[in-house]
Amino acid sequence: MKTTTKTSIITFAIASTISGVYAAGTASDTAANYAGTWSTSAANLGSGFGAWSLVAVNNNNPPYSGTYLDQTSYGNADGVLSSGYAGGTDANGGSGNGAFDMTRTFTAGPSGSSSLYNQTFSVALGSAGVGGAGSSLSVNVGSAFNLSYIGGGPDNFSLSVDGGPATAIPVNFSDLAAGLQIALAISGPLNSTTEGYSLTLSPFAGGPAFDVETGTFDSSSFNTSSFALVDANTSNNGFVNNLNISPETAVPEPASLALVAGGLAALAGIRRRN
């Protein structure tokens, strides 16, 4: 009986260590879920995400900002239609006319963390026109990552990590207009100054990636626990679709590996004594 109890305790400790309990919850949603329900107070559909927060910013005068459910029948230049639908944003006009923010939190995993951990967050992004100076279309993942196309400047995206300076990415407006698939993969260790990331921008329609950016970020100070799309004073509509958070991949950290090794050695000793 004692041998069995020890074995069970060690096995449980190993399983708990390997399983990884720090991730955000898995999640999935697509614009097609909102057929007939989308509005500025859109329902919280799909699974695994927090509710949408849809906010019109500085929306004092026409053309007013807002959101709508784009459909194939509308004939818009929308490169991220999926099953005939995409989420549309409008904040049309010159600088100062307004902006529209779409934000969605990530739900917490078993430990209570809502940040990504050995997971990939992906989203589809498109645009029918950004415009000149003072206009932009941006994607934020938590406080750690900002990916923006800014009007009136060079024809490329820029990436800012941990609130740092923006660096140019060789992906241009024609790529955005045709539809982008954005995938941010995060790898442990969690809550460290050197958590790894890989950001991939690919054609939504499929094919080789346009660009892959890799590096580290400070996950002890900057989170990856939400998604936001910010449409600021653009000359035409933005489009968003297919939000997804992948299941966590179990990648034990060094301390965990040491515990596993010790547990396996103890199991081996128990078996020898038996």
Image: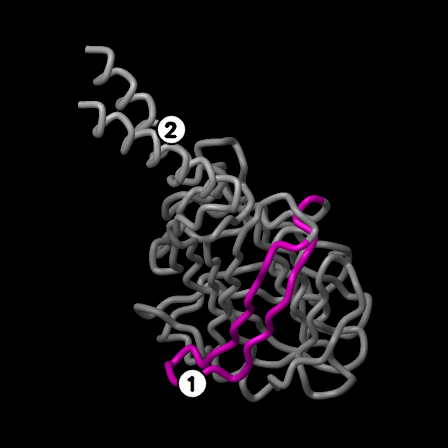
Q: Which of 60 and 80 is in front in this view?
A: 80
Magenta stretch: residue 125 in it?
no
- Residue 213 percent location from the top left of the image: 60, 74
- Give the quarter of the figure containing the N terminus: top left
Residue 73 point in image, percent of width and height: 36, 75
Indicate whether 15 appears above or below 128. Answer: above
Q: How many marks?
A: 2
Report the span colored magenta. 194-220
Q: In this view, does 274 lie to the left or right of 154?
A: left
Q: Residues within 10 Å of mark 2 (few under 14, many from 20)?
A: some
Q: Residue at x 55, y 81 (%)?
A: 211
Dot 1 amino acid type: Pro
Quick one: label 1 or label 2, which is nearer the N terminus?
A: 2
Does 30 appear above or below 203?
above
Q: Which of 138 and 170 is in front in this view?
A: 170
- Quadrant of the image for the C terminus? top left
Which percent across, then down, holds residue 258?
47, 40
Q: Which amino acid does label 2 sit on?
A: Ala
**Residue situated furthest top in the rendering:** 1
SS for tag 1? loop
Q: Quadrant of residue 63?
A: bottom right
Could you tell me which secondary element the residue under label 2 belongs to?
helix
Residue 208, disc: 1
Query: For this rendering, which residue is in front, 255 or 47?
Result: 255
Residue at 52% over, 46% down? 254
Q: Is residue 197 magenta?
A: yes
Q: In which quarter of the image is residue 5?
A: top left
Q: Are marks 1 and 2 in contact (CB under 8 Å)?
A: no
Residue 160 in the image: above or below residue 202 = above
Instruction: Please tell me which residue is depicted at 27% across the width and 33% down the height of the picture.
Output: 268
Circle 2 residue? 13
